[in-house]
Image (cartoon, rainbow, N blue to C red):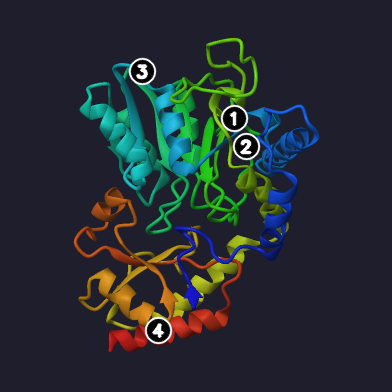
């Protein structure tokens, strides 16, 4: 099997992560922050160590502002609803995932808030103008993806963040497609909130999301409950991380994230993955029966994600034919209809190819041959 669906979830995981799973479950099986016995204390300490390591990985000083959630969708919901208030307004890009769009649309349908969509252009100047035109008196935040999960487009998110701050707005970054692949230094405080998952580029286990609060922001809660702290107080704690971490955490997933960070922190993941996709496109660019929706050979910085279609086949048909050859890719709309609308691919979807640090050139050669066969 050749696995090329790492934008959905990474596979395989590093051996160091897999080898430690049994040890974690054997030694840190108690509920974090709930017991004064030895294993309970050690479990809490290991989670704290992972929190500190994650903060260091993203270069933020306050490790308590690293919040562990259950996936990036949960992180985005907490961030969006945590800053929302009656009658407010948000701005998003036209490449956002449904993890951003659906929470906003649900609140819009209830008459709670509204949102506008700003188009990402090839030129940063025009992109910023598009966002600026959407700003209203009641706008509270701009939300933008770090990279399109369909087309690999990397918006000028730091410039968009600067625009948000110019108008005293919050900036929320969905970094799910780039976390662990392209380093993100948050020390300059230009980005207020970062949301991502552990199971994609960070090579961790499913069931862990990250919500990184990079500035002094008091998010409203959408979940309240037991935190193991200040239990006599019937109100939710005001301090992070307890304020946003109610209930039993994913102990295995959180602690194993420490191992996956150790694995990737000294590796140039981005260069490896983007080189493989450029090799793929160079070898198939002249094939008139294969259409690429991203030009990785243009010289512009793009995420290691490549979307294509073959002949007049629906993307699902192509993916099925590739699956028959033992190749795993994602087809369809990738939970991002706004992105497909921007490229006129809503009817067919696209075949998305996303390698990992473990993908080899031989895997891409096999894929090339399979696509040529399908194109004939």
Q: Position of residue 113 (x, y in %)?
A: 28, 23
89 or 190: nearer the eye?
A: 89
Does residue 106 appear to the left or right of 36 in the view shown?
left
Q: Which residue is mark 2?
A: 186
Structural crowding at the residue carrying mark 2, measured as other residues with C-alpha within 10 Å and reported as few (<14), some (14–19) or many (≥20): many
User: Quadrant location of residue 29?
Assistant: top right
Is 95 positioned to the left or the right of 162 in the image?
Answer: left
Image quarter in which the C terminus is found: bottom left
Q: CA distance from mark 4 to mark 1?
A: 45 Å
Q: In the rendered structure, find residue 85 and report the number of the disc placed on it.
A: 3
Q: Position of residue 218 (x, y in %)?
A: 53, 18
**Vertical placement of 309 versus 187: above or below?**
below
Residue found 47% across the figure and 70% down from its top: 4
CB within 8 Å, label 2 to label 1: yes
* Label of residue 325 in the image: 4
Marks 2, 4: nearer the viewer: 4
Label 1: element kind = loop
Pick whichever, 116 or 357, lies toward us: 357
Q: Is residue 191 above or below residue 360?
A: above
Between the C-alphas of marks 2 and 4, the distance is: 42 Å
Residue drawn at the location 44% of the way across and 47% of the way down: 155
- Sequence-first disc among 2 and 3: 3
**Mark 3 Cα-neighbour bin, 10 Å: few <14, some 14–19, many ≥20:** some
Sequence order check, earlier mark of 1 and 3? 3
Residue 189 percent location from the top left of the image: 60, 30
Instruction: Depth check: give the residue in front, 359 or 252.
Output: 252
Mark closer to the chain start, 4 or 1: 1
- Residue ID for mark 1: 214
Q: Is 24 on the left or on the right of 201, as rendered?
A: right
């Amino acid at each position: 099997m050749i696995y090329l669906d790492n934008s959905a979830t990474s596979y395989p995981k590093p051996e160091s992560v897999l080898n430690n799973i049994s040890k974690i479950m054997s030694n840190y099986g108690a509920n974090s922050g709930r017991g004064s016995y030895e294993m309970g204390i050690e479990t809490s300490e290991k989670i704290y160590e992972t929190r500190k390591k994650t903060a260091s990985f993203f270069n933020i000083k306050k490790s308590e502002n690293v919040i562990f959630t259950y996936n990036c969708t949960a992180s985005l919901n907490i961030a969006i609803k945590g800053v929302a208030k009656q009658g407010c307004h948000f701005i998003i890009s036209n490449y956002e995932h449904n993890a951003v769009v659906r929470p906003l649309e649900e609140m819009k349908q209830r008459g709670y808030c509204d949102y506008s969509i700003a188009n990402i252009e090839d030129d940063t100047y025009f992109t910023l103008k598009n966002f600026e035109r959407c700003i209203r008196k009641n706008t509270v935040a701009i939300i933008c993806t770090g990279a399109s999960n369909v087309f690999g487009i990397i918006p000028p998110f730091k410039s968009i963040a600067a625009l948000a701050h110019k108008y005293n707005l919050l900036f929320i970054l969905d970094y799910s497609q780039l976390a662990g692949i392209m380093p993100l230094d948050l020390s300059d405080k230009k980005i207020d909130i970062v949301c991502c998952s552990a199971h994609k580029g960070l090579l961790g286990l499913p069931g862990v999301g990250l919500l990184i609060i990079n500035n002094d922001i008091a998010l409203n809660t959408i979940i309240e409950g037991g935190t193991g702290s200040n239990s006599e107080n019937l109100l939710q704690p005001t301090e992070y991380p307890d304020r946003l971490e109610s209930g039993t955490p994913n102990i295995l997933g959180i602690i194993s994230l420490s191992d996956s960070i150790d694995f990737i922190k000294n590796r140039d993941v981005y260069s490896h993955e983007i080189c493989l996709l450029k090799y793929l496109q160079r070898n198939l660019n002249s094939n008139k029966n294969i259409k690429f929706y991203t030009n990785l050979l243009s010289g512009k910085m793009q995420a290691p994600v490549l979307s294509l279609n073959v002949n007049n086949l629906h993307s699902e048909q192509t993916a099925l034919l590739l699956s028959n050859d033992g190749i795993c890719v994602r087809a369809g709309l990738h939970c991002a209809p706004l992105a497909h609308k921007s490229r006129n691919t809503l009817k067919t979807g696209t075949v998305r190819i996303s390698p990992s640090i473990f993908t080899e050139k031989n895997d891409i050669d096999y894929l090339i041959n399979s696509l040529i066969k399908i194109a004939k």
